[in-house]
Image (cartoon, rainbow, N blue to C red):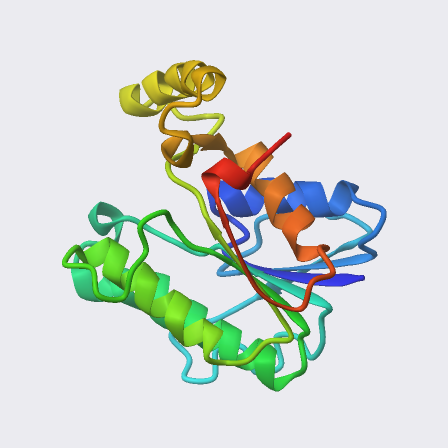
Amino acid sequence: MKAVVLGATGATGKALIQALLADERFDTVIALTRRPFFAPHAKLKEVIVDFTSPDIFNDAFQEADIAYSCMGTTLKDAGSKEAHWRVDYDYQLNFAAYCRNIGVSCFVLLSAIGSKATSPFFYSRMKGELDHMVRGLGFPKLRIVQPAAILRPESTRAVEVFMGKASAAFSKIGLFRDYAPISTTDLAKVLIHISLVESPGVLIWKRKDFIF
């Protein structure tokens, strides 16, 4: 199978690329990046994308069996709500629309817990509106994954370190299962697993559904 990944250089995207390259079911992995990033690999095709271009994805790739969209930033890194919306919403919706137009049959969208188009909170509303718009594109198979906090292996942020230690305890006693953090490595496994589930239509996976 051929997979294409948007957001390949982010924490989750990097873990996903490595997992796809190690998975014998995939023979081609297309990573869409702003600049050269990955070491050469026989299965990897790195495509440099100009996100300022009005035709962002034209000629970047022409076919894929599964598309994974896990691009995202933070309001702090983006610098403004407008810039945050452009990265998390516009780029991903454009990617989804392009994938639908070229006949990609399965689209996997990394969303977030609490995403709701009518939410009063900016981030949840942005994610919810994206979920809604992508659903409207009519993919034969759409998978929306809604984790809570995502733990990066290299992170030294105190809150992520604390949450990583607490999550195991929460899971054992069944508390806050929807809100338990998940590592990028495990999240990559979830993204691949749900993409290969044969059920047509829309599947939404929340944190409590992530079983290893």
Q: Position of residue 32 (x, y in %)?
A: 57, 62
* Position of the N terminus by quadrant: bottom right
In the displayed structure image, the side of residue 85 where residue 108 appears, left or right: right
Q: Residue 64's quadrant in the figure? A: bottom right
Number of numbered markers: 0
What residue is rendered at 37% in x and 68% in y? 130
Q: Residue at x 54, y 40 (%)?
A: 209
Quarter where residue 30 is shown? bottom right
Q: In the displayed structure, would residue 182 be above or below residue 198?
A: above
Q: Is residue 20 above or below residue 99?
A: above
Q: Looking at the image, which residue is at 41% across and 84% down?
A: 54
Horizontal and vertical percent for residue 131? 40, 66
Q: Position of residue 134 (x, y in %)?
A: 46, 73
- Kindly indicate the quadrant of the structure image that contains residue 81: bottom left
Q: Is residue 83 left or right of residue 41?
A: left
**Of 44 and 152, the residue lying toward us:** 152
- How far across and how far down the image is residue 132, in percent? 38, 71
